[in-house]
Image (tube, rainbow, N blue to C red):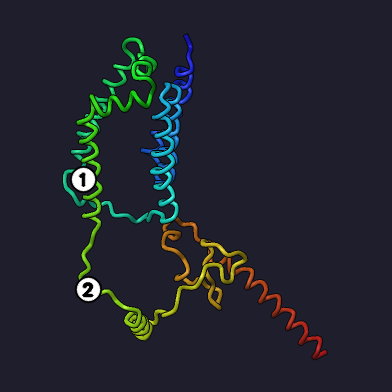
């Protein structure tokens, strides 16, 4: 008998598999994050089809709406440099990753086999036994799986503290004040010619003001200080000739009109 959960599974399962492959095979992190969002949204629909409204809401609000979207926005705003170092700082990562991958494959085989063998149980009986989906999850978390739940919480807190400790850097020198920063900029200007003022804004002499449109110097060349390093790595910076071509065309037209006027005056 064809049911709603069965239809949802066979419709979304191929999409989830393709999106999961996209997460692994995508060259750009933004594309991988979008594929992961597709997997999470499809999984949320699967929860809804299985009469699990609490898991559906958590999957959408927490994982897809908060964590993954924040990760995606950070990637879009900060960008990823194409010149990342591929040197392994911790030895033995690849053998451990291979062992973990093999263990995951074995676990996946057993999980799929357990799902295919026998009749599907579903969540209807479990929800009715505990008075609903949310009370059923609460009963399992705080009775049968309370130790695993608390251990997972402690593990996540430890991981967060460890990330904070690893990312923390002690300040070895005194923080520079504004007068010291001004003197340093003027010294660099005197020694290397680096401009002490703020960077030129993009699109100064362009037809539109955009971050991928660098500023043009008076000679028509591009000011490298106005081009973001992230845009350089992505290769999306507009060509300087394309930006300076309208200026050169106008200058030539003015020069031609000026020479024509001089010839008429002489005549």
Q: Nearest the camera: 32 or 85? A: 32
Q: Residue at x 27, y 74 (%)?
A: 175
Total number of numbered discs in the rendering: 2
Q: Is residue 158 left or right of residue 123?
A: left
Q: Residue furthest right?
A: 267
Q: Are marks 2 and 1 in contact (CB under 8 Å)?
A: no
The residue labelled by disc 1 is 158
Q: Is residue 36 left or right of residue 89?
A: right
Confirm whether residue 17 shows in the render: no
From the top left corner, tell me how far across and down residue 204 is, in percent.
56, 71
Say which element carries label 1.
Answer: helix
The residue labelled by disc 2 is 173
Confirm whether residue 124 shows in the render: yes
Q: Residue furthest bottom?
A: 266
Q: Nearest the camera: 91 or 123? A: 123
Q: Residue at x 48, y 14 (%)?
A: 3
Q: Residue at x 47, y 8 (%)?
A: 1
Query: Which image quadrant is residue 19 in?
Result: top left
């Amino acid at each position: 008998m064809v049911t709603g959960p069965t239809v949802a599974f066979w419709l979304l399962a191929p999409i989830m598999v393709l999106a999961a492959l996209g997460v692994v095979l995508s060259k750009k992190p933004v594309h991988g994050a979008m594929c992961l969002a597709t997997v999470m949204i499809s999984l949320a629909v699967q929860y809804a089809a299985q009469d699990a409204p609490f898991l559906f809401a958590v999957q959408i609000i927490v994982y897809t709406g908060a964590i993954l979207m924040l990760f995606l926005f950070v990637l879009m705003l900060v960008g990823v440099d194409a010149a990342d170092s591929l040197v392994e700082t911790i030895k033995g990562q690849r053998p451990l990753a291979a062992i973990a991958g093999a263990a995951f494959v074995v676990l996946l085989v057993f999980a799929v086999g357990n799902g295919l063998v026998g009749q599907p149980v579903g969540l209807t009986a479990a929800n009715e036994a505990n008075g609903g989906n949310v009370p059923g999850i609460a009963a399992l978390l705080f009775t049968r799986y309370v130790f695993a739940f608390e251990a997972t919480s402690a593990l996540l807190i430890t991981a967060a503290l460890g990330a904070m400790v690893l990312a923390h850097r002690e300040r070895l020198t005194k923080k520079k004040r504004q007068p010291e920063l001004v003197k340093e900029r003027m010294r660099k200007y005197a020694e290397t010619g680096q401009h002490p003022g703020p960077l030129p804004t993009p699109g100064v002499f362009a037809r539109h003001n955009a971050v991928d449109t660098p500023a043009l110097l008076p000679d028509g060349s591009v000011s490298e200080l106005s081009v973001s390093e992230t845009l350089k790595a992505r290769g999306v910076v507009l060509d300087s000739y394309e930006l300076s071509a309208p200026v050169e065309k106008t200058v030539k037209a003015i020069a031609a009109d000026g020479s024509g006027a001089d010839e008429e005056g002489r005549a």
